[in-house]
Image (cartoon, rainbow, N blue to C red):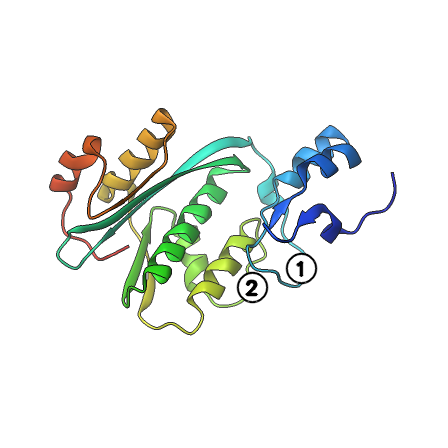
Amino acid sequence: MRDSKVNELIDSNNRIWKKELISNTFTEEDAARLLRILLARTPHEDFLIWEGEMSGEFTNRSASGIVARDSEGKVLLSCLEIHNDIPSAFAAEAIACWKAVQVGVEKGWQSLIFEGDSLAIMKKCSTKGQDRSMVGAYIYDIQQKIHGLNNIGFQHTPRSANNLTHILATETLRRREEIYLEMGVPKYAEDQTRYDGVSEPD
């Protein structure tokens, strides 16, 4: 096997691993471990990461459910995406947070509070400086996206207080369908929307 530089293994235009090249270059076990490493969507200098989070079961598929509300609790947007080849539930939480930040910032909403049920992810997003964990790539992307913006906050919310997004993510996986709706949620979640209390925009 010839020596390869890491950047040769990355599709720089789409910021994804070149799976076929990796599979043909490394052993099956090493290729699987390499493909679990998350890539930041914006290029940055290489840095060492803590590998402790690589252990554990590999999560093949996850879904992120995002609900944006105004100050009166009215749903502005519901966005549901399916993600494949996710290395851990921890990574899935980071991906969901990144997507929420991306949607909120690109919509141009001025005051944003992002809520999530992973205390660790919310803390990482709130802390300045380089995160060297396995989700550091997504934390970097989040920090770049909100750089220079005011009125951005991250808040830990127990899952029991955010049933709507949990229902949306669960149903997205079960139905295997992605959804992007403005001013509403899918029909199966309308009852939960009415039950949920007023919250800040996500």
- Counting from the top left corner in percent of width and height, residue 90 is at 47, 43
Looking at the image, do the residues carrying marks 2 and 1 touch, with CB atoms under 8 Å apart? yes
Q: Which residue occupies 77% across, 33% down?
A: 24
Q: Which of the numbered marks, if any, corresponds to residue 130?
A: 2
Mark 2 neighbour class, 10 Å CA radius: few under 14, some 14 to 19, many 20 or more: few
Is 141 above or below relative to 169? below
Q: Using the numbered discs, state the Cα–Cα distance from disc 2 to disc 1 in whole angstroms.
A: 9 Å
Q: Nearer the viewer, residue 10 or 197?
A: 10
Image side of residue 188 versus residue 65, left or right: left
- Counting from the top left corner in percent of width and height, residue 93 is at 43, 45
**Res 64 → quadrant:** top left
- Counting from the top left corner in percent of width and height, residue 177 is at 36, 31
Q: Which of 179 and 163 is in front in this view?
A: 179
Residue that extends furthest to the right in the rendered view of this protein: 2
Residue 26 visible, this angle: no
Q: Which of 124 and 108 is in front in this view?
A: 108
Is 197 above or below relative to 23? below
Tell me which amino acid carries mark 2: Gln
Mark 1 neighbour class, 10 Å CA radius: few under 14, some 14 to 19, many 20 or more: few
Image side of residue 64 versus residue 167, left or right: right
| Label 1: which secondary element | loop
Tell me which amino acid carries mark 1: Phe
Q: Which of the numbered marks, if any, corresponds to residue 47?
A: 1
**Res 85 → quadrant:** top right
Q: Which residue occupies 35% across, 25% down?
A: 174
| Label 2: which secondary element | loop
